[in-house]
Amino acid sequence: MKSFFTAFVAIATIVALPLDARPVAETSALSVRAATGLDKLFKAKGRAFVGTASDQGRFSNAQNSAVTLREFGSVTPENSMKWDATEPNPGQFTLSGADALVNYATTNGILVRAHTLVWHSQLPTWVSSITDKTVLTSAIQNHIATVAGRYAGKVRSWDVVNEMFNEDGSVRSSVFSNLLGTSFVDLSFAAARKADPEALLYINDFNLDSANAKAKGLVNLVNTVNANGVVIDGIGTQTHLGAGGAGGVAAAIKLLASAKNVKEVAITELDIGQAGAADYTAVVNACLAETKCQSITLWGVRDPDSWRASETPLLFDANFADKAAYTAVAKVLA
Ligand code: G3I
């Protein structure tokens, strides 16, 4: 139970200090995080955070929470902020899961990387069956105003548009693109900016793992949307890799960072089949090589809770013990 031991030592150290001798951040619940946590190591390199996917069913587990607060400086809701979870029927908002995630982060002094507002998947049928442009526009605007508005000032960033590209770089067929063309991107980002002017607004996708056609298609779209200023602040690359699949990541991140007026690039959902130490090392080095790469989010804490559990792709095993991949990442960041 290394995690509990580390947390105990950290708490014991803090308790031993007179209150006024503690750095401000160390007087909060942040203090349970050991000095060797991945987030602190990454921040020491001038980057924003290392985070993990979470949700109530995860952080309500004491061991999960201990590792989360020891290692990570941000949580991304794995499912609780998606459209099917937040607005299952028109105008009926069900935000208890999202509220719980934001409260957990706020209480513990960590960031929220919010995910996601406009996505063709986990989309209620009342949205996917809309056939009228005006009705769809209103649905998008109302959804974003309500969900992003509720957490305004409490999240660092939002994945506004998720997974809108095909592998060849063309725009995926969805209710959004079919009715509105790529104007759904502009109107979604405008609605998000209005709802939460301080959040960094991201476009996010998967298989952007080399300088491939999909990454180029995404960069072309961002160049167009951002032609006259910053509409899209950041590009997220999910980075769900297979074993041995990290070779193109550095080139991909450089390409994404070259998009016009983009402030940040983020690795948003990292997991790697079999969690090879060399693969994880390559991904972290690829991020460190590009100063715009400001955050790395793991898609979960321990293997059995992963969406691809059978591939054991994460940094912690079933007992929440560090794996070789964890040691490799910590070594690169140290
Ligand atoms: O909430 C229902 C529950 O009521 C029901 O009883 C249960 C029965 O199967 O299903 C529950 O929903 C599941 C949901 O996760 C919440 O646990 C869905 O079946 C399940 O398909 C869903 O999977 C999520 C998946 O997105 C859906 O597309 C994964 O947990 C989540 O890790 C995954 O995350 C996505 C990112 O958002 C976008 N990028 C890819 C990534 C991996 O697919």
Image (spheres, grey):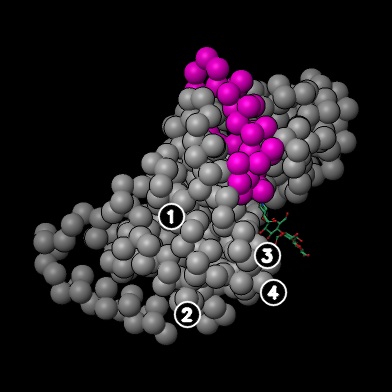
Image quarter for ligand 1: bottom right
Nearer the observer: mark 2 or 1; the answer is 1
* Residue corresponding to mark 1: 285
Answer yes or no: disc 4 within 8 Å of ligand 1. no
Among numbered discs 2 and 1, the one appearing first in the sequence: 1
Among numbered discs 1 and 3, the one appearing first in the sequence: 1
Q: Secondary structure at mark 4?
A: helix
Boundaries of the magenta span: 201-230
Distance between mark 3 and mark 4 Cα atoms? 9 Å
Among numbered discs 2 and 3, the one appearing first in the sequence: 3
Residue 255's quadrant in the figure?
top right
Amino acid type at image mark 1 = Asn
Is residue 209 shown in magenta?
A: yes
Query: Is the residue marked by circle 2 packed among few (<14), some (14-19), or many (20+) residues within 10 Å?
Result: some
Answer yes or no: disc 3 within 8 Å of ligand 1. yes
Judged left or right of residue 257, residue 80 is right
Looking at the rendered image, the quarter that the N terminus falls into is bottom left
Distance between mark 2 and mark 3 Cα atoms? 19 Å
Percent from the top left, x then y, of residue 211? 60, 41
Distance between mark 1 and mark 3 Cα atoms? 25 Å
Residue 147's quadrant in the figure?
top right
Query: Nearest the camera: 110 or 204?
Result: 204
Distance between mark 1 and mark 4 Cα atoms? 26 Å
Query: Pointer 2 and pointer 1: residues touching (CB < 8 Å)?
Result: no
* Residue corresponding to mark 4: 310
Residue 321's label in the rendered image is 2
Amino acid type at image mark 4 = Ser
Q: Which residue is at 65% across, 62% downward? A: 242
Query: Nearest the camera: 228 or 29?
Result: 228
Answer yes or no: disc 2 within 8 Å of ligand 1. no
Among numbered discs 2 and 4, the one appearing first in the sequence: 4
Percent from the top left, x then y, of residue 17? 14, 69
